Amino acid sequence: MTEKKKVLALMCERSVDVNDADLQNLSDLGVVKFPCSGMIQPLMIEAALKAGACGVVVTGCQIGDCFYREGNKLLMERLLGERPPGLKKNVDKRRVLGLWLSKLQKSRFIDDTKEFTNFVVNLK
Amino acid sequence: MNRSHFFILLVIVGVLALGTLLISSLMPFAEIGLNDSVSSYPGWLQSVAGFLVAFYKPFMPIGNDLAKIVTAKGVTTNIGDYAYVVFLSLALVIASLAIGIVGREDATEKTVIGDKK
Amino acid sequence: MYQEVLKQLNFITLEIEKLVNKITTNKYNPFYYHGALPQFYLWVLYLTGLLLFAYYIPTVDNAYLSKKMVNAWTSVDYITKTLPFGAIFRGMHRYAGDAMVITIILHMIRVWFTDRYRQYRWVQWTSGVLLLVLVLFIGQTGYYLVWDDRSLILTRMTVSSLTYLPVIGEPIKHWFLNGDLISNLTMSNFLFIHIGLSFSLLSFLWIHYVRMTRPVLTPPPAINYILVALVLLVVFIYPINSGQMADLNHQPTSFDIDWFFLFPYWLMAKVNMGVYWLFMLAGVVALTVVPWFVRSKPVEAAEVVTNKCTGCSLCYRDCPWQAIEMVPAPPTSRFKLLATVKPYRCTGCGVCVGACAFDAIDVPDLPDAKVLDQIKGLVGAT
């Protein structure tokens, strides 16, 4: 493995589709892809933060447009603590960002991720 | 959202709400057949008839235009009902715009949960 | 090739939705409620239909008209000309029907273009085709009920198309006309078919929804208002007038066509009856088998790790496909319940993995342990 990434993106493979060229641009970003954002579990976010990530970006499709019906909505509710299981209390919630974008909104994803990276890297 | 944005939004929604009210107030006017003859008003409205006539007077030409459109298509009776429908649908459209403007605040493409802390 | 085209169409759909999102935001994007739109129009049809039903008289009798006898045509005429707002409700009933067909087709096209129609969704697709056929047929029966010239010619065309069918044609015709000839009994049968089948839609809709948890049944009010307003504006722009009262001794030859419901009659007039039936049947069969045009990789269903499951039923509540069932746990277990996956319903989406706080359910394609390894590999301390 090469250098460790500072920010981890847990991404739905049907929402924004980042390729290797984009990742060159976002050198601080590591990507794990899921069939649906609903598969992303708060425990995974906690594991990433515990393992040393500065922040975690979670992406799903536009709210209302999940291929598997409601994965993105369920995840959003879990992140907001409206649906069990949620994030544990001791997790620094500022280090988690949810983005709900369609496949065509790649530039929005890159912009927001860069901004978020700058924010979390300087966070103490 | 800062104060001035909120104020602008409030004004827009207020105007839309007033528009809905105004247009839906034309519905009874259509219901009695698009005219200002006091005799066709139901009894309980007779007492305020003078006010209503003054209120509906400016809308008479609109009513006549709407009536002309449907009579050209072969409608002979209950022409006021068709004008009623136009007023109702306009009111619905404006109301839905107003609801949409207020409700779009909830739409989200981004969830930042740190804010709560 | 076929899949390439569909992929492009998916992108076009996404482009359009992105554009609409800019105006309406995702909360009010009608494309995100595509299935709920026809459902909403169904309620509109039930309500307006209820009012029409209250005043409709299902008879064809016109022998005693001079004695102010009423029949279907005169009752519809009364609704249109005399009843306050009768014409409006009649128009709404008619155009909400058209709107329902449009929204159903929109719904169908969207699920097709976005690849949401095959594999585990085959029940929804095939029941949807059945519903579409039913809706079209119910719409046609609505045109018989008015009992003007057009109703008569449509009834006669239907009868001749039915008599063409060997063996089953004659009994179906007998059922359709409620006898051998057009009579008062025919009209009450038409009314029964129209209303009875409309309510049977609900039971087919149950099949349509049964595999989905929390189906989206109602668009938000802002969209509903627009949907009603659209129908009302069409009622104003194209007011409805009945044709002449049907006369059984007279054979009308042409009629105005409603392309949403009456296109089969257009075809029937153009080609020979055999071709017509072949075309209609082939059309329905082709639509039904669309999900199997593409060979799809079988889904690897999620698996419950039996000794970790605590029976908390979070996955059961969250599964969007009703694919998880809570069963009594085996006596050796400390817990009362155990989650089990119905593999034929599972889509492999992994929502249950996200719902489980105990790592007790796994999707074989991407197990939990593998995800955690990837995460640690990417960000872990060296």
Image: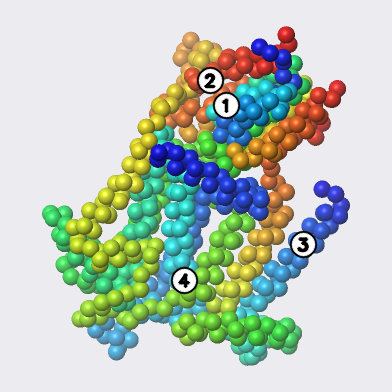
What secondary structure is found at the residue carrying circle 4? helix
Q: Which of A99 and C99 is in front in this view?
A: A99
In the image, residue A69 above or below residue B22: above
B46 left or right of C226 in image? right
Instruction: Identify the subunit bearing mark 4.
Output: C
What secondary structure is found at the residue carrying circle 1? strand
The residues bearing labels 4 and 2 have C-alpha atoms spaced at a distance of 54 Å
Q: Residue B12 carries which label?
A: 3
Please rate how many residues cluster around mark 2, counting C-alpha atoms within 10 Å: few if below 14, some from 14 to 19, many from 20: some
Q: Identify the amino acid type marked 2.
A: Leu
In the image, residue C227 above or below residue C118: below
Q: Are marks 1 and 4 on the same chain?
A: no
Residue A8 location, x and y as percent? 69, 23
What secondary structure is found at the residue carrying circle 2? loop
Instruction: Identify the subunit bearing mark 3.
Output: B
Q: Is the C-beta separation of discs 3 and 1 under 8 Å?
A: no
Q: Identify the amino acid type marked 3.
A: Ile
Q: Which of marks 2 and 3 is in front?
A: 2
Please rate how many residues cluster around mark 1, counting C-alpha atoms within 10 Å: few if below 14, some from 14 to 19, many from 20: many
Q: Residue A34 carries which label?
A: 1
Q: Which residue is drawn at 53% across and 47% down?
A: C13
Residue bearing the label numbered 2: C366
Q: Are marks 1 and 2 on the same chain?
A: no
Q: Which of marks 4 and 2 is nearer the N terminus?
A: 4
In the image, residue C327 above or below residue B52: above
Residue bearing the label numbered 4: C91
The colour scheme is rainbow
